[in-house]
Image (spheres, rainbow, N blue to C red):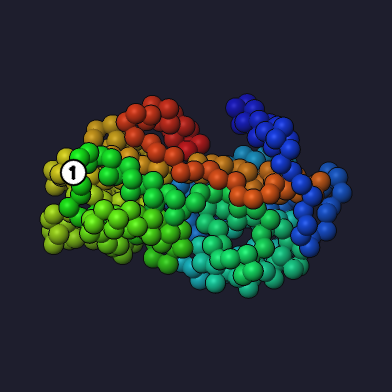
Amino acid sequence: MKINIYGCFIVSLFFINSIFLFSSGKQDIKPLTDQRYKFYVVTHGGISDPFWSVVKKGANDAGEIYKCDVIYLGPETFSIQKLVDMVETAIAGKPDGLVVTITDEEALDKPLKTAIEAGIPVIAINVPDSRDLSKRIPYLAYVGVDDYMLGIEAAQRMLKEFGLTKPQRGVILVHEIGHAGLEARSKGIIKVFMEYGIPVEKLAGSPNASENYQIMDAYLIKNPETDAIFTFGPLGADPLIKLIEDKNLSGKVKLGGVDLSISMIKAIREGNMVFTIDQQQYLQGYLPIELLSLYNKYGLIPTGNITTGPSIVDKSNIDMVEDMVKGRYR
């Protein structure tokens, strides 16, 4: 029942604010019909990652409410080539709509533009095409976070934790190399730290949590002055939390993250993690299915981006989000 109420609220919010307009895109507007639509959701992350399991839940919940078939495709491990292959598989399925993470805009440019020319409406989630409008993939809407601003906010929140002092050295663990969104986050963090004259660098991690433990352990042995660490998801945060516990580093290094997991909430409560940044990934799964349903039925689509974050989660508000994480809504 909660899901139905939530879905109705979102629809009502869109209509109350009158943000729906007829699309000026090339796709033909389809008349009101009882047709059961088929939508593909193709992302760079598999459901073994806690983040993407919530995205999938959001998409499936919307599919039940709007009575459409939702097919989720994601690789077991991060791979741009696998992402492109899955997008092409989805296009071959001739869906009524396609939801995609634009994790590599150059690699996805041709297949997505081909799909749009063929009349398949596309919505981007999680990572947008950051190029200027003349080059950008002409998808209908973007639902997600501004990754560069996420990096800015993460860096500023970290500096706040140091009070009147400042970090000696920062490091950013990037667990998916080649991910445009993670690169944008890194740029935001580096910009803020450079403005304060704080050394900071990116460290190539892995989609494998145990490898990230070893990578960061070696880095801290080599750079013992490091006292500010940033990770970009549970696959980076969880092994770092364990490393902090194993090496008795609590209070010596400060860990900031992105996204939420049960272990991250526990770490914030216990002081092994300072904060994390929520981007409300349930909405990144739910809203595109809702939008594609409305677009197919009525030709309606909101203008501009629908931002789902960033918002800081720390000890001051952890109680507000814990139950939603356990219920897989955040």
Picture quarter with the N terminus? top right
Q: Is residue 164 above or below residue 179?
A: above
Residue 43 occupies which quadrant of the picture?
bottom right
Q: Is residue 253 left or right of residue 51?
A: left
Q: Is residue 36 left or right of residue 316?
A: right
Q: Is residue 168 left or right of residue 195?
A: left
Secondary element at tag 1: loop
Q: In front here: 99 or 89?
A: 99
What's the residue at 30%, 62% (across, down)? 202
Q: In front here: 318 or 303?
A: 303
Q: Is residue 54 visible?
A: no
* Amino acid at dot 1: Thr
Number of numbered discs present? 1
Residue 9 occupies which quadrant of the picture?
top right
Percent coordinates x, y for residue 266 in the rendering: 30, 34
Q: Is residue 144 above or below residue 183?
A: above
Q: Which residue was labeled with disc 1?
A: 165
What's the residue at 44%, 50% (across, down)? 149
Q: Is residue 167 visible?
A: yes
Percent coordinates x, y for residue 296 in the rendering: 78, 50
What's the residue at 30%, 51% (across, down)? 230
Q: Is residue 200 left or right of residue 58?
A: left
Percent coordinates x, y for residue 271 in the rendering: 23, 35
Give neighbour class at mark 1: few <14, some 14-19, many 20+ (Cα, 10 Å). Answer: few
Percent coordinates x, y for residue 268 in the rendering: 29, 35
What's the residue at 44%, 39% (across, down)? 311
